[in-house]
Image: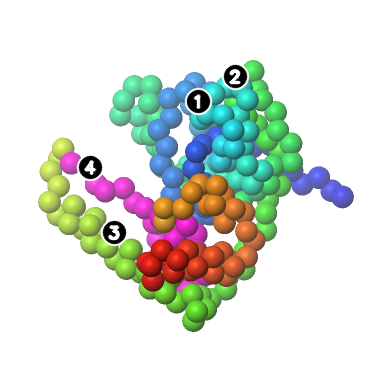
Amino acid sequence: MADNSVPLPIFALGTVLFPGGLLPLRVFEARYMDMIRNAMRGSGEFGVCLIRKGQEVAERGVETAEIGCRARIDDWSMEQLGVLQIATTGTERFRIVARRLQPDGLLVADVEPIDEEHVVAVSSEAAPCQVLLRRIVERLEGDREGKDASKTDDDEALPLLIAKPYLFDDSTWVGNRLCELLPIPVSAKQKLMALTDGPTRLDIVLRYLKQHGIV
């Protein structure tokens, strides 16, 4: 069997990144500053994996999930010396096949891409999820418009939580966005992100919403 793995620096975090999701990061550790600089010189991407054991700042003993998501660097700024603010978007999922720790503590993994999910329309049974997400997006956009209209030079705009284009008819996109927004434990979010079937993921989200009386 051919080895299609490629090396990828890994940012181990206590969060789960989904394809199409937005992830702002505040970077100040030297190893991650170097990682971001090297990424911007190359593909502009690095990997994000959920921490299974250890801490985000630990240099040794960190264990991560086997499946993660590539993060594409969209923008960056350094308003505070030594603190890098970056805006990233999740692109494609990957599976770790091997890993190694560099002398500076940075985790580098050999990863294989996971095939993209096919676009499948939201079923009539899962339509409540679609309706809920539309309402959330409308509320977020209304809040941003109100903030933009009233802000002064000292105000900061509300951060984007969901990126356009809005794909309300795509079961994978709807499921991913709700997984990001709902107060689901990160261990459950990791399992949902690792699923390879969008409609199944959305059905699980629908059951969660019904169990909690949200829809």
- Whether residue 151 is visible to the viewer of this picture, yes or no, is yes
First in sequence: mark 4 or mark 1?
1
Residue indicated by mark 4: 156
Report, in whole angstroms, how far the alpha carbon at label 1 lies from the one at label 3.
32 Å
Report, in whole angstroms, how far the alpha carbon at label 4 lies from the one at label 1.
28 Å
Judged by depth in the image, the label closer to the viewer, 1 or 2, is 1
Residue 190 falls left or right of residue 213? right
Q: Classify mark 2: helix, strand or loop.
A: loop
Judged by depth in the image, the label closer to the viewer, 1 or 3, is 1
Report, in whole angstroms, how far the alpha carbon at label 2 lies from the one at label 3.
40 Å
| Percent of width and height locating residue 110 | 71, 38
Indicate the quadrant where residue 128 lies: bottom left
Residue indicated by mark 2: 104
How many residues crowd around disc 3 within 10 Å: few (fewer than 14), some, or many (20 or more)?
some
Q: Residue furthest bottom?
A: 124
First in sequence: mark 2 or mark 3?
2
What residue appears at the point 66 percent right and 25 percent down from the top-left corner?
Answer: 101
Amino acid type at mark 4: Glu
Report, in whole angstroms, how far the alpha carbon at label 4 lies from the one at label 3.
15 Å
In the rendering, which numbered label is found on residue 57?
Answer: 1
Q: Classify mark 3: helix, strand or loop.
A: helix
What residue appears at the point 50 percent right and 47 percent down from the top-left corner?
Answer: 186
Residue indicated by mark 3: 140
- Say if 123 sits above or below 195 in the image: below
Magenta residue check for 179: yes
Q: Classify mark 4: helix, strand or loop.
A: loop
- Say if 73 sits above or below 32 in the image: below
